[in-house]
Image: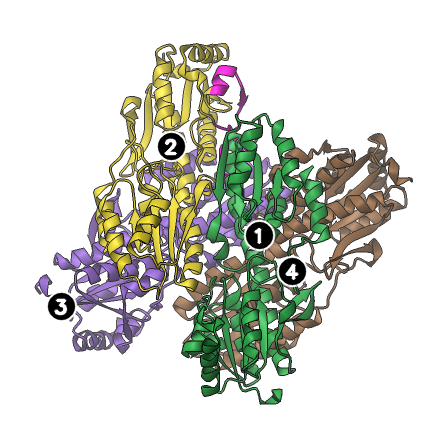
Chain colours: A purple, B brown, C green, D yellow
């Protein structure tokens, strides 16, 4: 369709929530307002599309919410949208409300949903990568990652206080769903003695080598990412095997990493991505995710937005250096 | 002994560390300096007394550390001090270094140790209650409690963001070692839907009644204290029994509650208790803990400083009201 | 009137806002709900009463806002309510909406307004002390004070970093409107080298004595309260007179102290005061402020709620000791 | 000289301090340790070089300080080093202690000093850009900028609470020394109604246009950078001219922006720059600053590291869009 006819954009947040989503919503609404475009926000991801559950978003109202974590549109995973039946209902909603384009903030699953939807719905779709895990191809930073790392390190800094007071070994598990980005960033920036991430095999060897000679005359801080084949309990048991006398504690930071006021970087990222999303729709792009690679705007087709399981070379070198 | 001969006070931190201990050390050193008394700080609790491991504390240096969590003297539990042999060695340390009085920051176990020590060591002993659990008789506030609650609620506020974005049930476990003070304070102040503490039996019934009708159109936040007969997993399993379709997550805040920069109240408490400890020594008091009951200084003999397992009436009434 | 006929309570926030006001609103709404009482919240203090601008408050909605600073009812100073004409209009609003009692969160000016109002309006009035300045007779803590002190010290801790890196003299001005409570609490708890408050004359002498010998081999941190006869510039000029070579910086923390998520203590205080306010109305009390003195609930008639200009003895002794 | 003979590197921090400097020190010490190089840290910038005031830095000790603001080496501006006499003394210090290379963390003034020093001292010099102002050519991020912005927005978020409670106009002045980077980043990310920076002239016109129609039915938040021809008072007076009835408050955040625990990004930046600095010395580079442009390591000769007075295009476009 001709993009100069875009009068009404629908937006929604989908998948796991992450800090910065409200900033992106504000940015989209502001960009749209300046261009005379109306914005409707669907509640609970694809569920709101199917059920026609939405509200008109005003940039003036969203401006006051830019600093808040979570997403005011709520989010959900939708089983119904995985069926053609559900997608047809969503299409009816868009048609009935004369929505000309869609912007989705979410992860690879969200964008796969849009790809499937595009088979029956011929309006532009643009995606914004929102996940704390930072594991999507096509962008150096996903929305929420920097906030999650900041929350992690503020909490690990607190743990360091008690670890040093007791000369204890602490194992802190951070999030990542099999991605080591939060682990490697938070581990390096708290001065951890060992950092264990799902993508790397050597780390545990380094750790056990170090812990063998550990004399309990100091704290020993391990940061480990959650993962199918890794995690705090596994590491704890390996350490106990190697050195049974160790005074060891585990803390799993958990869902605190998903919430909280977004960091400056995530708010800025939300703003930049929101502006870009509206612009790309007006340029006629569709089925693409906006991202920033080496600080340059980069569009990635939805079918190329896969989970990345490779840590960047520079990070790997840092990991190796600081494990020594 | 005559208290006007007090020239040299030894201090140490013992048991679990808690935010505010460094503020108390500063206050003791400052009070002592003004009165011309020397202060030596023993490292790692009773271990430092036994081993003669100590340093001279200057109020000018400690002044820069008043805002830091943990304890710069480190802390430990000492098996050796539980034996007469260990206490005799500690006595030698004090004698050899002409220490006229001791101030200990710790919990009921710490003070029991001093009671045993007083059988062979005839100098004044004063205690300062330092524990995040707030479960000691003789004071309304223990050092570190307010900081722990503030850390808990800042993190639970973050969890609320993601809970509301997903309309999820969240069970957040806070610390307390069988004491419900952190649970009840943090639960009330985050607006929890249910608060479960070890001291109360009715709460779980209220909770299950509420969750039975829970429709997942909103978040549902449960704060539960750790305890032998309670805890996040137990509550989760009970909820799942009652309502198997609930989308539920657990986060155990863990040791983050023990660290971090102390709150204003805890720094002030450390300062007030430090001043009082030095004054009470100079008045000739011994084997007593300083505390504040209804904001008035209160001395409690060490043998009366037991763990309290009763929540104050006003709190119980609030708990009942806000559980409805 | 008979208090068992209380069916509908009006509430509003007035004067300067302070952290914890939303927690108090939640608590009032929850207490009222349990007792079957309806709650209406008037916007912008007395202005809302005059204009009939209000909304029904539901405890379920307020529960999600307990952690937020500011006041969702907004606040204002009302010139119109100082005229009989304005108060008559407010009375009409109450009558028209069958409001049986009023709870006001504010300061001494707010309560004076209620006293004047009581001459023409015969329903129970209860006040909750909300001000960061902590300068009201009848309570040890006003709502918002603990949060303001925590905000002040978190910021002064940051200033300490740069002060120590440069060995600079820093003068930090905190709020208080001629009351020294924020100054004395924040000054003591950051380990300030000098603390200057409006209520005390000797402090400046101590400070100048200290600064005379200051050798710039260390940071020197001064905390000063705002006040008519005191303040950062005055102190700076006195220091410069005494020691012209000093490398000195000024920071006035300003209105950041009025906002931000309330501390645990302020949320709890708001909850306790909210519950007490509803209970006291139901007991038939009127024209009184609820407060806590030495941790006990205390009612103070509105005409006795004056600004206090005397720092408590214990604080004065601490101030003197830590100024040495 | 041959770089494989580098056995001993001297480091110092100079000019204004900024959060992340300790992380960089840790990273340099760790990198050096792995390569068998000794590290000495000079106190108070060039003053320590002149006076031979230094200490040996161990990566194990620095590891515990990575999260702290300020610089443990202290910093200063040195008049003596601007004279040849001072530089000669510094050269003697380096020679006497067999220091083979120097790493300086500071700003353009610091690097100019090194350039002058290189005329008499023939060892490799590498610079790391440390300033909160983010105004140096050769890097997208200077060390400390992200932390300063995060501190600014956390405080402005608090101001928003009270601004909205009172429907007030607030003018918040942030730092920058004639550079608008902190202003534009913090203004966008708090949802300011107007952002004024030294580099732009049009902003004030937009602002006055907006404020003309301001009806006090809402808060109005202005973020303004400090600058010679701009600042909070100027803006306040212009607003008052345009609309005399406005209820307006000013807060200047001041030096809090220079301190505080560094953000995740700044810690990471310090780590990355520290590693790069050691590597570049070993490669034989000299008189260059390490930086990251578009996320790629970039060396800039000291004589090209000038203050930038141009805001990037993308930021200018955002500024224009969000000012509408």
Q: Is residue C265 visible?
A: yes
Q: Which residue is mark 2?
A: D273
Residue C231 vs residue B237, the one in the foreground: C231
Q: Tag 3's secondary structure?
A: loop
Disc 3 marks which residue?
A122
Q: Nearer the viewer, mark 3 or mark 1?
A: 1
Q: Give the magenta part as a residue range.
A: D47-75
Give the residue drawn at x 30%, y 61%.
Answer: D214
Label 4 crowding class (10 Å Cα cut-off): few <14, some 14-19, many 20+?
A: many
Q: Position of residue B144 (x, y in %)?
A: 64, 53
Label 4 and label 1: CA atoms lie apart by 40 Å
Residue placed furthest toward the left = A2
Residue C142 coordinates in the image, percent (x, y): 60, 62
For the image shown, how many numbered marks are present on the structure? 4
Quadrant of the frame with the N terminus of chain B? top right
> Circle 1 sits on which residue?
C178
Separation (CA) of disc 1 from disc 2? 48 Å
Mark 3 surroundings within 10 Å by alpha-carbon count, few (fewer than 14), some (14 through 19), many (20 or more)? few
Asked whether disc 3 touches disc 1, contact meaning CB atoms under 8 Å apart, the reply is no
Residue C204 at x, y percent in the picture: 62, 38
Element at label 4? loop
Select label 1 or label 2 by which is in front. Answer: 1
- Is B34 positioned to the left or the right of D240 in the image? right
Residue A133 locus on image (x, y percent): 37, 53
C-alpha gap between disc 3 and disc 2: 48 Å
Crowd tier of the residue under label 1, counting other residues whose Cα lies within 10 Å: few below 14, some 14–19, many 20 or above:
many
Residue D19 falls in image quadrant: top left
| Vertical position of residue A106 compared to residue C203: above or below | below
Rendered view: C220 above or below D111:
below
Residue D282 in sight from this viewpoint: no
Q: Is residue D19 magenta?
A: no
């Amino acid at each position: 369709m001709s993009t100069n006819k875009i009068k009404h954009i629908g937006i929604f947040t989908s998948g796991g929530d992450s800090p910065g989503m409200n900033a992106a919503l504000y940015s989209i609404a502001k960009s749209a307002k300046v261009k005379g475009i109306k914005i409707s926000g669907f509640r609970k991801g694809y569920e709101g599309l199917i059920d026609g559950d939405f509200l008109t978003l005003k940039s003036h109202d969203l401006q006051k919410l830019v600093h808040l974590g979570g997403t005011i549109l709520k989010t959900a995973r939708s089983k119904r949208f995985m069926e053609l039946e559900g997608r047809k209902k969503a299409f009816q909603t868009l048609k009935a409300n004369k929505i000309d384009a869609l912007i989705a903030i979410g992860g690879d699953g969200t964008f796969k949903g849009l790809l499937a939807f595009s088979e029956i719905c011929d309006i532009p779709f643009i995606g914004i990568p929102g996940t704390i895990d930072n594991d999507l191809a096509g962008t150096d930073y996903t929305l929420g990652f920097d906030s999650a790392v900041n929350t992690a390190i503020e909490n690990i800094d607190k743990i360091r206080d008690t670890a040093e007071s007791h000369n204890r070994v602490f194992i802190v598990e951070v999030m990542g769903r099999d991605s080591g980005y939060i682990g490697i960033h938070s581990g390096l920036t708290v001065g951890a003695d060992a950092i264990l991430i799902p993508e790397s095999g050597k780390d545990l060897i380094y750790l056990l080598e170090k812990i063998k000679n550990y004399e309990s005359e100091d704290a020993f801080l391990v940061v480990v990412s959650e993962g199918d084949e890794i995690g705090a309990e596994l590491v704890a048991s390996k350490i106990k095997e190697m050195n049974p006398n160790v005074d060891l504690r585990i803390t799993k930071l958990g869902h605190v990493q998903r919430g909280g006021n977004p960091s400056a970087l995530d708010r800025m990222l939300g703003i930049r991505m929101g502006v870009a999303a509206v612009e790309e729709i007006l340029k006629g792009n569709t089925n693409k995710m906006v991202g920033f690679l080496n600080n340059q705007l980069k569009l990635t087709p939805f079918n190329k937005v896969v989970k990345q399981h490779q840590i960047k070379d520079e990070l790997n070198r840092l990991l190796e250096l600081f494990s020594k």
